[in-house]
């Protein structure tokens, strides 16, 4: 029996988020420049989408480009941005055939014009699709997101629209980029690193974390199945005792 056959189809996470790490190290092992790893990593995105469609996962969030990534060498950043535009254009028909919609979280205003234009057109083209939502975290960081949420809530308090004593978890969540997206039940990080890297810090409060040694360009459908199978072995208590959730 393979991993897919062992998965309980009645216990599938609705939202899986992935920190796609290891492109540069993978490329270095091949004797190539870092950007080569990013380009090969596109196939891992396809594999992940296929796995999500097979399992019935509704949301797949990919940590595509963080606000801190602008600090990388200019040639690598420019290459990633060009690759992003090219990839979105190349994958549109496939995403549409898979009935996949596109959502972007992050500071889109800070992206190059070519990226913003391509993303806008892609979102419009895929707008009617709802079998799977591909969520791209672009120019995103959780501290940036939370800071903006605090500013928005502070302005509502200042104008009298909201009282400080009425601020709830729900109100904060509604000010985040992910306001219309459920929190991820499972977060995967590739390449063997064991950190969150400023990703969905508010949303991952009760997420299961799964770390794999696999470098992102080598990530296959089977690797996502293994992560989900591991997720299903966890007891999700949300602060309660085991006896309470039985």
Image: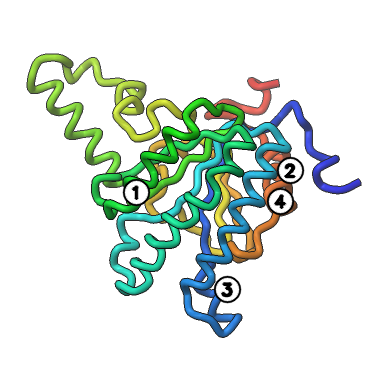
Residue 2: percent from left, percent from top: 86, 48
Q: Label 2: which residue?
A: 229
Q: CA distance from mark 3 to mark 2?
A: 26 Å
Viewer-proximal residue, 78 or 154?
78
Residue 82: percent from left, percent from top: 39, 62
Q: Closer to us: mark 4 or mark 2?
A: 4
Please, is residue 6 above or below residue 81 in the view? above
Q: Which SS class for mark 3? A: helix
Q: Which residue shows up at 58% across the image and 41% down it?
A: 95
Query: Which of disc 2 and disc 4 is earlier in sequence?
Result: 4
Query: Which of disc 4 and disc 3 is earlier in sequence?
Result: 3
Query: Which of disc 1 and disc 4 is earlier in sequence?
Result: 1
Residue 80: percent from left, percent from top: 41, 63
Q: Label 3: which residue?
A: 26
Q: CA distance from mark 1 to mark 2?
A: 29 Å
Q: Label 4: which residue?
A: 221
Q: Label 1: which residue?
A: 140
Q: Which SS class for mark 2? A: helix
Question: Do tag 1 and tag 3 residues touch (Cβ < 8 Å)?
Answer: no
**Does residue 185 appear in this view?**
no
Q: Which residue shows up at 34% across the image and 67% down it?
A: 78
Query: Which of disc 3 and disc 1 is earlier in sequence?
Result: 3
Viewer-proximal residue, 177 or 131?
131
Q: Which SS class for mark 1? A: strand
**Does residue 76 appear in this view?**
yes
Q: Which residue shows up at 85% across the image and 40% down it?
A: 5
| Residues packed near mark 4 inside 10 Å, few (<14), some (14 to 19) or many (20 plus) | some
């Amino acid at each position: 029996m393979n991993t897919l056959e062992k998965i309980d189809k009645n216990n599938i996470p609705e939202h899986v988020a992935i920190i796609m790490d290891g492109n540069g190290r993978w490329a270095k092992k091949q004797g190539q420049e870092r950007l080569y790893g990013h380009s090969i990593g596109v196939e891992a995105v396809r594999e992940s989408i296929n796995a999500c469609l097979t399992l019935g996962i509704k949301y797949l969030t990919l940590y595509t480009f963080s606000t801190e990534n602008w600090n990388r060498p200019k040639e690598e950043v420019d290459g990633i941005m060009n690759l992003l535009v090219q990839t979105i254009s190349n994958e549109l028909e496939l995403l549409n055939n898979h009935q996949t919609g596109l959502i972007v979280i992050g500071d889109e205003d800070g992206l190059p014009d070519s990226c913003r234009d391509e993303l806008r057109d892609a979102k419009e083209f895929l707008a009617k699709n709802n079998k799977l939502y591909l969520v791209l975290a672009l120019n995103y960081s959780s501290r940036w997101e939370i800071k903006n949420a605090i500013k928005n809530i502070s302005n509502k308090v200042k104008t009298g629209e909201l009282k400080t004593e009425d601020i709830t978890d729900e109100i904060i969540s509604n000010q985040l980029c992910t306001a219309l997206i459920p929190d991820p039940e499972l977060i995967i990080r590739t390449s063997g690193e064991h950190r969150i890297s400023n990703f969905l810090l508010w949303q991952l409060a009760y997420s299961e974390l799964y770390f794999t040694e696999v470098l992102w360009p080598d990530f296959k459908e089977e690797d996502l199945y293994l992560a989900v199978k591991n997720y299903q072995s966890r007891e999700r208590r949300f602060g309660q005792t085991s006896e309470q959730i039985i």
